[in-house]
Amino acid sequence: MVQADIGSAIGLESAAVQTLLDFGEYMPHGMCLLWEPWLLILWAGSDLLIFLAYFAIPLALFKVLRQRKDLKHRGLVLLFASFILLCGLTHAVSILTLWWPAYPAQGLLKLATALVSATTAVVLFKLVPVLVAIPSRRELEHVNGRLLEEVAAHEETLDVLRQARDELEVLVEKRTAELRDVNAKLAVTAREAVHRSHNMIAVVSSMARQSARGVSDVTDFVSTFTGRLNALASATQTVMQEPSGASADLGSVVRAQLEPVLLSFGDRMTVSGPEVKTGSEAAQQISLALHELATNAQKYGSADGEDARIRVSWSVRGEDGAQNRLRLRWEEDLCHEPGMPVNGTGRTGFGTRLLTQIVPSMLQGEASRTVEGGKLIYELDVPLSALAEGESQAENVQLATRLTAQGFGLA
């Protein structure tokens, strides 16, 4: 019984295959066209063109899929390509059936085409909302435009930030350079303070020894020594009051030192000269000389007469190829009784040596103190370069100290 069923099934399959392959009982499609050549050419040519077109479209779609691996709906594209390719094959088989009546095979091909077409339609309808939601080209261009604007705005912001960064770097570099300069100036100032303190100690010590020499009255010593210290302090204060803090006008130094005498003598004392800048140490030496001259004028009564006058002047001169020099002149009308010392001219003490040796040595110049025609004339001639601040002042202080000590037997 089983063998009979198997044999029956095999017989049915053989009959079906035989039916598909046996085309002899059908007529070619060309007979329906009465084998008219122009109709055959029209039908065959049209189907051929359709087949070629339907074959080319899937190739293009496959090429797109190959180059755009990021496409989201690749399955839909494959369905469309399969559908179009099967449609093309049906037209190719239609050409064959004009002369070869393979209608069963053509029917099976059409069935496959119908199934693929139906599947494509169902999938397409399901994807309609998704496809509709895809932004249009105009919307994409609008979004891209906004993105470009945002990118441009960010670029402008970055440019501003870069510019601010560059300006900040320049500012930091400038401030760093200024800080280095300030630190350097502070270091120089510190060294200068130490240097000046040593110089001042040497000068004050020497003045103290010489002021005390030969003085039996403590009051006279205190008065003389205090006056000389005040001369140094007044000169330093005058220089420090200037905006630069490093130099002052010589006229300010002279007037500050002679202010008490100017108030006492009034119009009988004149001060004149051009503007000349001087450092603190040079101002101190000139102030010491002026203080000594003014003290002697008051102490020994040389300016007590109503007609006696004191003229203080200075000038700057320079010869061809020579260094410019400053000449300070003190001219005092003498008015004294016979036998009275003339502004210290009869003394050979510390004041005289201060005027003629110490101060000129400190300022790298020379000085003279003479009495001519009833006048006391003191002239100090120094190079302008000696008036400026400089490290060479230390050597001058040491030289002046040695001169003072050796001259009075203290060394």
Image (tube, rainbow, N blue to C red):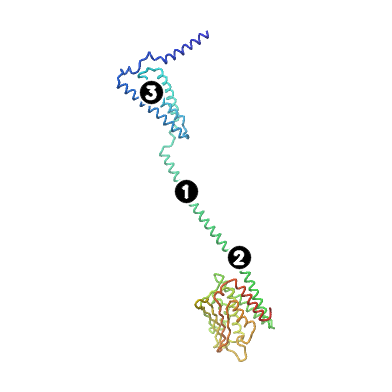
Q: Quadrant of residue 173?
A: bottom right
Element assignment for label 2: helix
Vertical order, 78 against 394 (above or below): above
Kind of residue at badge 3: Ala
> How far is the residue under mark 3 from the one under mark 1?
60 Å
Which residue is the site of mark 1? 155
- The nearer-to-camera label among 2 and 1 is 2
Residue furthest toward the bottom?
A: 338
User: Counting other residues with Cα less than 10 Å from the Cα at mark 2, is it few (<14), some (14-19), or many (20 or more)?
Assistant: few
- The nearer-to-camera label among 3 and 1 is 3
Residue 340 on image: x %, y %: 62, 89
Which residue is the site of mark 2? 187
> How far is the residue under mark 2 from the one under mark 1?
47 Å
Q: Quadrant of residue 308?
A: bottom right
Kind of residue at badge 2: Ala
Kind of residue at badge 1: Glu
Q: How many numbered markers are drawn?
A: 3
Q: Earlier in the sequence, mark 2 or mark 1?
A: 1
Vertical order, 346 against 279 (above or below): below
| Residue at figure coordinates x 44%, y 42% from the top left | 144
Vertical order, 8 against 126 (above or below): above
Residue 27 on image: x %, y %: 35, 15
Q: Are marks 3 and 1 in contact (CB under 8 Å)?
A: no
| Residue at figure coordinates x 50%, y 52% from the top left | 162
Q: Earlier in the sequence, mark 3 or mark 2?
A: 3
Element assignment for label 3: helix
Q: Residue 92's mark?
A: 3
Residue 73 on image: x %, y %: 46, 32
